[in-house]
Image (cartoon, rainbow, N blue to C red):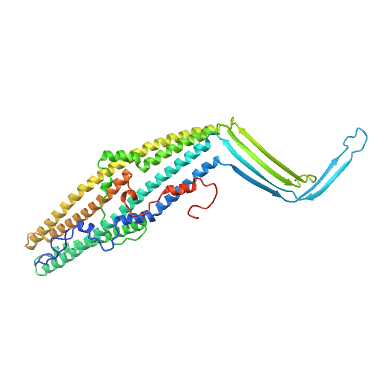
Amino acid sequence: MWHLRRRVRAGGIAVGATALTAASLLLCVLPARADTLESALTQAYQNNPTLNSQRAVVRETDEGVPQALSGYRPKVTITATGGQQSLSSTTVTNPSRISGTPPNYFTQSGTNQPYGAGATITQTLFNGFQTANKTRQAESAVFAARETLRATEQTVLLSAATAYMNLLRDTAILDLQRRNVEVLQEQLRQTRDRFNVGEVTRTDVAQAESSLAAGRSQVLSAEANYTASLATYRQVIGVNPGKLAPGTPVDRLSPGDLASAISISSATHPTVTTAQYNVDAALQQVKVAEGALLPTVSVTGSVAKNYNILGTLNTVDNYAASVLGQVSVPIYQGGAEYSLVRQAKETLGQKRIDLDTARDQVRQTVVQSWGQLQAGKANIEATEAQVQAAEIALNGVREEARVGQRTTLDVLNAQQVLVNARVALVTAQHDRVVASYTLLAAVGRLSPHALGLNVAVYDAKVHYHQVRDAWTGVRTPDGK
């Protein structure tokens, strides 16, 4: 750990060579109540609206299974009628005029109140296996939705880790730039003092003033970046940040070599498994479309009781009951059913291509993430060496400037090189942590369970089993 100490030298710079490095900013001492990266991930898992929305999508998709299963169940309808009728009818008893007898007309009229009730039960016995295939298709859609939810979880957790580290980085850079302005202010003060006693020229003072103005501009840019990262943190994680504790890489959770990472991701990454379930759903849709070409067998039972029958004034009541079987064999329905089969087969082919595309994309992401992580590890070592060398160089330039062998501009340039090196180290440490989370997500292992987050993991199976075999009811399991 580097520490900040000040020392005053005659004709020199007030701030000594040993200064607070970028590492001590990013890997700071933990405050009493710090927001850790793990707690931020937990809050994002609980609060992120995108994740909560996708959970609702999964619950919505679950309802497709009981809808498909309804094809196995009977359909019951109860009907009731009632009202007022007014009826008038005229009949002829001798309509023939051949016999010479005139026709006899009889007129009947009146009103009554017909009413009745009945029930019909229809049970499908066979529909070309469409119900079974629709159920399998709905289950595949549920599995695909769960994998999409797992992909969303990874995206949200990665975004949360990135937002946390971005804010930590920008906080450190802002502190560095503010400290740099303090140093430049002291440099300007001492340069003016030396100008007053004739040790330097007006040009040296102007150079110090210019560097201070540039440093203040860098502070403003750092403040803007900090504000943007603060807003992103609030949007992704759902709460305002406190004091941020250091973030640590998660390399231990990723495979030890690139070949293993590619193999695991190609089999278990949620993007790949979602595509696999989409293929299964498309295959079942082909079978559903083909089932429309097969016969349908059903049985219908009905019972009805009517009083004061509608359309007559003489019948007081009527009772009827029946049980009928029906076989329907489609011969030709205009050709639409054949087009639907062909269309479903084309969709199946597309989903298989999408599966290959998903595997290729996942592999590319893993290789890219692996390379970024290795580069991030090496970059930290390089920037640490850069900071150490820049500190030594600044010390030397200051000593030489004190005895007149270096100009004020040389000191200012060396100071800026050191600040840039410290900013580079902060950025490298940020990139190192983010790259480890990116690789874990690329492999498909970025989850609350793998990270060991202290949070109740959302179990999509609970809602599924609550609604799968529900025959009735309009209230959701959460009471809405």
Residues 189 and 461: in front is: 461
- Asked if residue 149 can be seen in this view, the reply is yes
Q: Residue furthest top?
A: 331
Looking at the rendering, which quadrant does residue 224 occupy? bottom left
Residue 392 position, x and y percent, is 11, 56
Nearest the viewer among 135 and 375 is 135
Q: Which percent across, then down, holds residue 339?
A: 52, 33
Give residue 191's position: percent from left, percent from top.
13, 66
Quadrant in the rendering for residue 390: bottom left
Left or right placement of residue 13 versus residue 134 in this view: left
Tally the marks. 0
Which of the 4 quarters of the picture holds residue 405?
Answer: bottom left
Q: Residue furthest right?
A: 100
Placement of the N terminus among the 4 image quadrants: bottom left
Q: Can I make out residue 435 in this image?
A: no
**Picture layout, residue 462 above or below residue 238:** above
Please give the name of the residue rendered at 34% of the width and 61% of the height, measured from the top-left corner.
240
Residue 354, image x, y percentages: 39, 38
Q: Residue at x 36, y 38 (%)?
A: 357
Q: Residue at x 55, y 48 (%)?
A: 472
The residue drawn where x is 43% and y is 47% is 461
Q: Say left or right for 195 vs 251.
A: left
